[in-house]
Amino acid sequence: MQNNRTYLLSALKIFLALLWVLLTAAIILLFHFCIRSNHSLVVPFMMLLAYFLLAAFFLFRLCWRWRMLERQVHNYCISDNIEGLMRQKLFCSRLIDRVMSIASTRFESVDYLNHSKNLAQYLALQNQINPHFLYNTLECIRSEAVLKGMDDISSMTEALATYFRYTISNVDNLVTVEDELKNVENYYTIQHYRFEEKISLKISLDKDSDSDILKWYMPKLILQPIVENAIYHGLESKVGQGELQIHLEHAAHRLIIRISDDGVGMPKERVNEINSRLLQISKNDLATLSSSQKHAGIAIVNVNNRIKLLFGEVYGVHINSTENIGTDVEITLPVQVSREL
């Protein structure tokens, strides 16, 4: 069944046709009046000429702009490139161009977010391994270790299997704060076998915070990259033992997670450089994050970008650090009581 719709172009054509008829009728009447009253025809002729020249000019401009619009839409139809269409000027009105610009930014944000999610998985597990094969192999190793009384190997293998299972599974979903903390604990268990008593982990909740804070939801794989940064860039280079603390609190409808270490810290210039990058989402970070080189700050920038894309510019990550004293990484999230964004 065909829809009886009057499109903008059709309405514009009808309006121009009616305007043309009315103006033409007015000029004919003017000519008739001049002939009957023996007036000069020079003025009506000049008016007629000016009328047709102006009409031709505006009609040409209108048709040109409309052809440009149709050409851009046609290019989208044959290429299915919505991003290219969003970046074009459609020559309709300033408001429509602004709408298209906003839509383009949102499309790019979605694409950036999807890239960051995939990158989060890539940084956590760089080899494309069949997850089921990995789980089954680690479970066999753990079983053999249990049978031979090798409890340390059994515990480490179990922690590694659990960590990989959590990391490889769907990054799109929000997870509970409790699940994210458990993943950090599994990661710490694996690192503890390497560093032994050199590092320790403490997780605490603010006594005045909501008791249901562990049941709230947050983006997946937010804490582990920062904990990894703290261990490798803060505590590993430290002489003697080092402590890592994760503190959670609830303030003004926000969930604040502070990850602190008493490691080697960073120079003030480096802290300012990272914080300036954390203030806004930058597409240039994609190229940096996609490279094989990883250094302090990259994981933090990625986490910050994901948070801002999901929840808005007012949320994200901020760093405080002092050389030879330690580093605090503060994550600010909205209070999320369900999986729905």
Image (cartoon, helix red, strand yellow):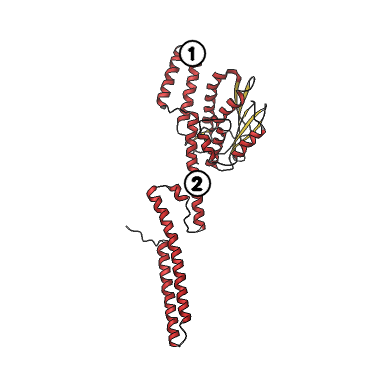
The residue where tag 1 is placed is: 150
Label 1 amino acid?
Met
Q: Earlier in the sequence, mark 1 or mark 2?
A: 2
Q: Residue at x 45, y 30 (%)?
A: 168
How far across and how far down the image is residue 102, in percent?
A: 51, 50
How many numbered circles are shown?
2
For the residues labelled 1 and 2, the Cα–Cα distance comes to 53 Å
The residue where tag 2 is placed is: 106
Q: Residue at x 54, y 22 (%)?
A: 191
Q: Is residue 142 above or below residue 116?
A: above
Q: Is residue 276 above or below residue 245?
A: below
Farthest residue to the top: give it: 148
How far across and how far down the image is residue 201, in percent?
A: 59, 24
Q: Which residue is more in the foreground, 254 or 282?
A: 282
Q: Is residue 324 above or below residue 65?
A: above
Judge the density around disc 2: few (<14), some (14-19), many (≥20) Cα neighbours within 10 Å: some
Disc 1 or disc 2, which is closer to the eye?
Answer: 2
How far across and how far down the image is residue 120, in percent?
A: 50, 33
Label 2 amino acid?
Arg
| Mark 1 element type | loop
Q: Residue at x 43, y 61 (%)?
A: 64
Q: Which residue is more in the foreground, 288 or 110?
A: 288
Q: Is residue 29 above or below residue 199?
A: below
Number of the label disc, if any, that sits on residue 34: none
Judge the density around disc 1: few (<14), some (14-19), many (≥20) Cα neighbours within 10 Å: few
Asked whether residue 109 is in view, the answer is yes
| Mark 2 element type | helix
